[in-house]
Image (cartoon, grey):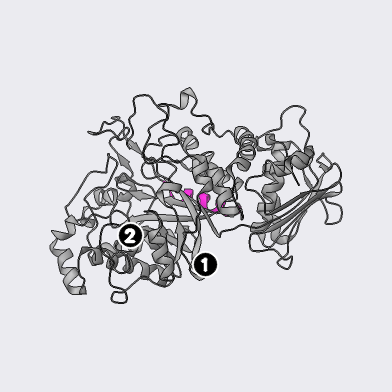
């Protein structure tokens, strides 16, 4: 069916849905008009989706969407594992008699309900209806299923803290795009962001810093303002419950053994050089954790408290950018190397990571870490020779690798039989510059435009079909050194997140010329939702940051 041959209703279906559904065809007739008499019904397994639909869509369109019976309701939601759909898949059919959403599971019903919402005018993303609005679902038949199991976004709340209300909003926007993993980066050199009852000083002393670097100029300049904040455990419970209702899994990250300056500030015995201030600059600090039994017990206790809060099967332990200089000069680290028969400090890091991997496995959870967790036993990264295969203890079978320094770590892990999440910097880092214009605020990293995100391929070339099965999916990473407000977060994330969402949900070839008109229509939804995205043509005057210097 050619674009030129579409009627108005068909065009609304084919040209505005993001992510693009696997199969879509216009139906006959005028579709379904929603009125005060419209009734809704859901089977028991879809009851949570119905509650979401009535609350979110009902308030937006100003209609009660009263409950009805299965036979007299106009909108019907149900779970049917025997409907021939894949996990998270759904079938949506709208005609003049009603709208039916059938999902393989509750997640599939939820994604079908998200598509149903997109079929309505963009004002359905407001909190209340505009005057005179009419709500008509076009006649259509859609069958859809996601390409990947892991469709994620990492939000760094350690560098600049985002309060609970912003995280809840971020989850809503992820769910709007059918993303299903929120990776929360909860600790770093510049702040510890989650309450641990057993170790209160982590938040009493480690959750704030005296000032923050502004931009990336050298020598650094600072703002002179204290910055801090953290999530109480009840905040975490609320975020996890909110996300679960929207079929988003929250994966916590506590970064070790590097990027730990805030923890060492709170508990100096964790480090190798006594008390240090919470980091105020961006970059990599030399301070690392000691590799003593006491430090391992400390982090096992931290992990155990967090496992009570986060039911996700995955727990992220970081493992990236760990300098080795302190270990080279540390008597306790050198003693550990000798006692364990390790070759060097790279193998010492691998030994440390494996202890936490084993602890998580004993709790029935799976460790995930940045691709440095392969170093010292399988892969030496970009700076050293490959480690001898078969000679060193590796990760547990359930451990997964997040490949960020290009694709090489993901390829090595997949070939070794480990699951992989692809997040290479050049296609996945949403703190990177969006143009080379002088108006682009705080330009760092390499150029990453909407089309670059959209057209990149998550599965690396050269993997066999069996190896490619280990690619769980992909995620984008939102590092917040230069993202200090919710408005700045909107600008850096959207609409690149919309492009990413289609890449990880939709199968088949991707053509940016076909995608862009749908994206422009989708921006009206973001407008209605109050998202202050970056216009495709470039920043608005108030979105620039004159005088704040980035880096190449």
Horizontally, is 4 left or right of 225 in the view? right
Residue 155 visible: no
Residue 257 or 416: which is nearer the viewer?
416
Relative to residue 528, is residue 482 drawn left or right? left
Count residues near mark 2 (Cα–Cα under 10 Å), then give few for <14, some for 14-19, many for 20+: many
- Residue 227 percent across, percent down from the top left: 34, 36
**What's the magenta bit mostly, secondary-structure-wise?**
helix
Q: Residue at x 56, y 48 (%)?
A: 501
Q: x, y (%) of residue 315? A: 43, 61
Residue 177, position as x, y percentages in the image: 59, 47
Q: Which residue is found at the position 72% from the left and 36% from the top?
A: 121
Q: Is residue 444 magenta?
A: no
Pinpoint residue 421: horizontal percent, then vertical percent.
46, 59
Q: In this orientation, does residue 445 appear?
A: yes
Whole-number angstrom distance, CA of label 2 to CA of label 1: 22 Å
Q: Nearer the viewer, residue 336 or 2?
A: 2
Query: Disc 2 or disc 1, which is closer to the eye?
Result: 1
Q: Which residues are magenta?
A: 231-245
The residue tagged 2 is: 372
Which residue corresponds to mark 1?
469
Q: Quadrant of the C terminus?
A: top left
Of residue 433 and residue 208, the one placed in the foreground of this image is 433
Q: Nearer the viewer, residue 308 or 117?
A: 117
Crowd tier of the residue under label 1, counting other residues whose Cα lies within 10 Å: few below 14, some 14–19, many 20 or above: some
Q: Is residue 161 above or below residue 536?
A: below
For image coordinates 52% across by 42% down, the residue present is: 451
Question: Where is 1 relative to 393, above or below?
Answer: above
């Amino acid at each position: 069916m050619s674009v030129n041959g579409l009627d108005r209703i068909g065009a609304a279906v084919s040209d505005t849905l993001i992510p693009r559904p696997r199969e879509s065809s216009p139906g006959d007739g005028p579709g379904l008009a929603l009125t005060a008499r419209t009734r809704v019904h859901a089977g028991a397994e879809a009851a949570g989706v119905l509650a979401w639909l009535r609350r979110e869509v009902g308030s937006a369109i100003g209609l009660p969407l009263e409950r009805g019976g299965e036979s007299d309701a106009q909108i019907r939601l149900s779970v049917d594992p025997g409907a021939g759909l894949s996990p998270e898949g759904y079938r949506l059919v709208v005609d003049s008699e009603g709208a039916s959403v059938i999902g393989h599971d509750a997640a599939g019903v939820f994604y079908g309900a998200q598509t149903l919402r997109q079929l309505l005018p963009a004002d359905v993303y407001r909190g209340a209806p505009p005057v005179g609005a009419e709500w008509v679902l076009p006649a259509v038949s859609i069958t859809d299923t996601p390409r990947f199991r892991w469709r994620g976004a990492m939000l760094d709340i350690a560098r600049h803290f985002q309060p609970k209300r912003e995280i809840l909003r971020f989850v809503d926007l992820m769910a709007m795009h059918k993303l299903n993993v929120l990776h929360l980066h909860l600790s770093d050199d510049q702040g510890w962001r989650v309450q641990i009852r057993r170790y209160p000083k982590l938040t009493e002393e480690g959750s704030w810093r005296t000032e923050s670097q502004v931009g990336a100029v050298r020598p650094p300049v600072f703002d002179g303002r204290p910055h801090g904040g953290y999530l109480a455990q009840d905040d975490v419970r609320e975020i996890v419950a909110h996300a679960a209702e929207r079929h988003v899994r929250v994966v916590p990250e506590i970064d070790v053994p590097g990027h730990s300056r805030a923890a060492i500030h709170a508990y100096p015995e964790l480090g190798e050089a006594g008390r240090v201030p919470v980091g105020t600059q961006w970059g990599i600090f030399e301070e690392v954790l000691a590799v003593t039994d006491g430090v391992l017990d400390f982090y096992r206790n931290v992990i155990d408290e967090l496992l009570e809060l986060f039911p996700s099967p995955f727990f992220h332990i970081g493992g990236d950018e760990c300098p080795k200089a302190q270990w080279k000069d540390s008597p306790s680290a050198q003693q550990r190397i000798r006692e364990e028969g390790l070759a060097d400090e790279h193998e010492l890091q691998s030994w440390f990571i494996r202890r936490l991997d084993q602890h998580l496995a004993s709790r029935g959870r799976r460790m995930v870490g940045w691709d440095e967790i392969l170093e010292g036993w399988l892969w030496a990264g970009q700076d050293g020779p490959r480690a001898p295969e078969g000679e060193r203890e590796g990760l547990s079978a359930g451990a997964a690798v997040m490949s960020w320094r290009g694709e090489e770590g993901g390829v090595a892990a997949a070939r070794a039989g480990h699951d992989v999440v692809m997040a290479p910097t050049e296609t996945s880092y949403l703190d990177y510059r969006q143009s080379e214009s002088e108006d682009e605020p705080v330009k760092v990293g390499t150029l990453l435009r909407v089309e670059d995100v959209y057209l990149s391929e998550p599965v690396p070339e050269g993997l066999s079909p069996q190896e490619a099965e280990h690619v769980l999916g992909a995620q984008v990473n939102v590092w917040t050194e230069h993202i200090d407000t919710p408005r700045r977060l909107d600008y850096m994330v959207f609409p690149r997140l919309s492009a990413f969402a289609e890449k990880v949900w939709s199968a088949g070839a991707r053509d940016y010329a076909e995608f862009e008109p749908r994206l422009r229509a989708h921006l009206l939804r973001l407008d209605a939702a109050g998202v202050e995205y970056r216009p495709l043509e470039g920043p608005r005057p108030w979105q620039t940051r004159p005088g704040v210097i980035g880096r190449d």
